[in-house]
Amino acid sequence: MSIMEPFGHRLVTAIDHRGPLCVGIDPHPGLLQQWGLPSSVAGLERFAMTAVEALGPTVAVLKPQSAFFESYGSAGIAVLERVITDARAAGALVLLDAKRGDIGSTMAAYADAFLGEGSPLAADAVTVSPYLGFGALTPILQRARATGRGAFVLALTSNPEGAQVQHAVTDGGETVAQSILDAVRAENVADGAGPGGRSGSFGVVVGATVGDVAAVAPRLDVAGPILAPGIGAQGASAADLRAVLGAALPHVLPTVSRQILGAGAGAPDAEGRRSALRTAFDAALTGVHAAIGADGGEV
């Protein structure tokens, strides 16, 4: 039995109350420099916690990028643990952007680390890569079900290199990306999520910059959420969501990082940075509402 309400249900509630936007926390050295902070654990912590303090009480989902914390070793991971704890305490769901993909006991260990009850790194959901075979994700899917958490599976990513694998055609005549989308849908339907629904706990990642999605993956209904990165610094605008994702818009959770985080540059103090981030978040959310026709009640 799940110890929490299933992630998919909690995500729908968060979006309905807080709006359809996920904000990434990506403390790469360039952003720290723009904020006037050192590339050190102290700078990392100040940057990340300012973002949590500013956005945690209002955003539906915060998405810390694990690599930028891991790069500082154990002290950086300790900051990540605090980000996860404090963001959830503020009412935001936490999607840990780890993009792990492995097999057997190694994948089970990742499941324990990122979705296991009692783990200091346990988030509400985690991003995972299916490109060692979708079946290799089984430990993650099983642990998510057991703990009421979720996973977002890479399907059509916003980086141009991804097409080499994701656009490849299988023996069945469909693309690899479509096979991943169909597999995620099957997992959600097996859990009772109806076709066309948005409450499944397993989502997919489909970049807002991938262009004509229908030509690669005509079936985007996964009975769960579609995380759409690429808005802002990667070149896509909120308005691109409708053109790229079309009828799948009711399932889309756009994610923005540098467009919001960069607003903290030039602020005179911590409160100024928090205020700037909140203003940038409000503007981004307004743009998403206008682009996908959301008014706070539907995604």
Image (cartoon, rainbow, N blue to C red):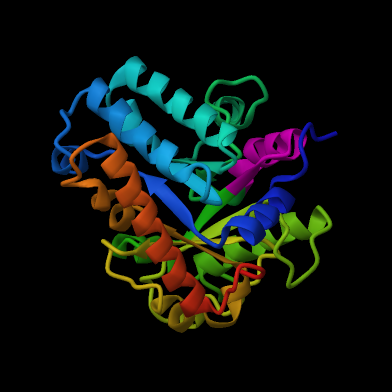
Q: Position of residue 136 (x, y in %)?
A: 59, 42
Q: Main secondary structure of the magenta part?
A: helix
Task: Report the magenta residues as a range.
Answer: 135-151
Quarter of the rendering containing residue 181:
bottom right
Q: Is 77 or 15 nearer to us in this picture?
A: 15
- Residue 223 shows in the view: yes
Image-based side of 186 in relation to 21, left or right:
right
* Residue at 28% from the left image edge and 43% from the top image edge: 273
Query: Residue 148, image x and y in percent?
Result: 73, 39
The residue that appears at 38% across and 72% down in the rendered structure is: 210
Relative height, residue 299 to residue 260 (above, below): below
Viewer-proximal residue among 58 and 135: 58
- 225 sits left or right of 37 in the view: right
Residue 137 included in the magenta stretch of the image: yes
In percent of width and height, residue 272 lies at: 27, 43
Of the 4 image quadrants, the one containing the N terminus is: top right
Can residue 103 be seen by looking at this rendering?
A: no
Relative to 117, say whether 169 is above or below.
below
Please give the name of the residue rendered at 53% of the width and 75% of the height, measured from the top-left corner. Answer: 217
**On the rendered structure, is 97 left or right of 7?**
left
**Which residue: 48% across, 45% down?**
62
| Image spot of residue 107 (x, y percent) | 56, 32
Residue 9 located left or right of residue 262: right
